[in-house]
Image (spheres, grey):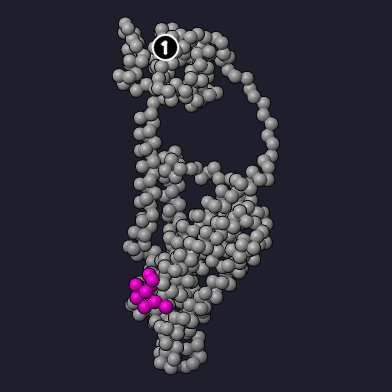
Amino acid sequence: MNPDMNARSRLSSLEAAWVIARRDFVAVLFSRAFLFFLLGPLFPVIVGGLAGSIGSQVQREAVSVEIGLAMSEPDNAAMIAARESLRPQLGSALPRLAAVPEAREPGFDARAFLEARRANYAAILSGSPEAPRLVGTEAQVAHWQGPIGLIAASAAGAAPAAFPEVRTEIVATSGASQRSNRIRTAQAAQMLLFLLTMLLAGMVLSNLVEEKANKIIEILAAAIPMDAVFMGKLFAMLGVSFVGISVWGAVGWGLWSLGGDAVTAAMGSDPSDLPAPAVGWGLFAILGIAYFSMAYLLLGALFLTIGALANTVREVQTLSMPVTMMQLMVFFLAAYTITQPGSSLELAALVFPLSSPFAMLARAAMDETLWTHAAALAWQGLAVLALVRGGSMLFRKRVMKSGGAGRAKRRRWRARPGPEALVEPAE
């Protein structure tokens, strides 16, 4: 074959990486395993949302805040009217009031009625608006004594039907208060970044081990540069990860729209209550995507290196465990340095590539400075290239046996035209 034609038929490293990325992205995205992978994290979320909804409904029905009225009919009507007049301003601070039908019976005893548990009242209010008498457990009486007194005073004409408007004067929050609030946003962002990275980065390792077992990776490595193979696989899995995050985000938004209160109860807090980060929500989201990409590529490059060293699934599990534990320690380091701005420990977390995405995302929530993010992203990109280079060298040395036999094998593959045929997915 003409050497010039052979050279023209070969792909450049960038083109080869694109071919590998496109091949892996399509193969993984349209596999049944990826569908089950997407459904896996959704089951706990859906079950948690349903459990929170059911639990809150049961709690609302089991714990009554209705006060039974055992006064005369005019007094009952006056108490209910007073309660309705105060409700626009006090809302849920006031209990519901309802007349007790059994109170019309001769010899009605509120204490005996409650102890007999004949109805689901929190307490019984008897007497008159001028001299109310609240009967109930110690906790219920202590909780509702004040609101009942206010309603009774309004019904008796001793309290205004509407409270005067309170003038307010807003002051700026202090620096300490603002920093304390932004720490919550930084911690939440770091936790989300860590969970997504650890959940999704394992796909890179499983993909490489599978292709090593099928000898596909050796064919690819013989046809195109190993650096391009590793880089293509990394970006393919990164693209698949964004697809997964988009699906989970859409499902989460749907659940939030259908039952926001239940989702908030299941989570234990409302994410919308997080204070705004220092750089603003828009730029913070862009930086979050960039730092997730870098954290994923860094951890994925480490996993590719592990795949190059391992020959069996058991070896992969054994070698990946220290990396997983190291990543956990790195996350703890970045989380701890949130409260140590400007310290040598924070500088170490910012410089060390594996902890840099977490530490820099927290800094985006705490500090308005932007040029540091450009420098950090460039540094993390260089670290990704170095890890890919090192992993591909280990792979060539251990798998391709970079001796005479390996070089002869690569020459035979490179002599064949059209390397795209080796890496393109089957139609």
Residues in magenta?
Answer: 309-318
Q: Quadrant of residue 178?
A: top right
| Residue 22 visible somewhere in the drawing | no
Q: Which amino acid does label 1 sit on?
A: Ser
Residue 272 in the image: x percent, y percent?
Answer: 53, 43
- At mark 1, the secondary structure is strand
Residue 125 found in image quarter: top left
Q: Position of residue 354 (x, y in %)?
A: 54, 66
Relative to 119, say whether 209 is above or below.
below
Q: Where is residue 396 in the image (x, y as percent from the top left)?
A: 45, 83
- Between 384 and 318, the one lying in front of the other is 318
Question: Vertically, is 365 above or below 20?
Answer: above
Residue 302: give x, y in percent of width and height: 48, 71
Q: Residue furthest top?
A: 106
**Looking at the figure, which quarter contains the C terminus?**
bottom left
User: Residue at 42% of width from left, 89% of height from top?
Assistant: 406
Q: Residue placed at 51% from the left, 80% from the top?
A: 12
Q: Which residue is drawn at 32% across and 12% down?
A: 102
Q: Can residue 298 be seen in this view?
A: yes
Left or right side of 202 for 369: right
Q: Mark 1 points at which residue?
A: 126
Q: Which is more toward the observer, 202 or 114?
A: 114
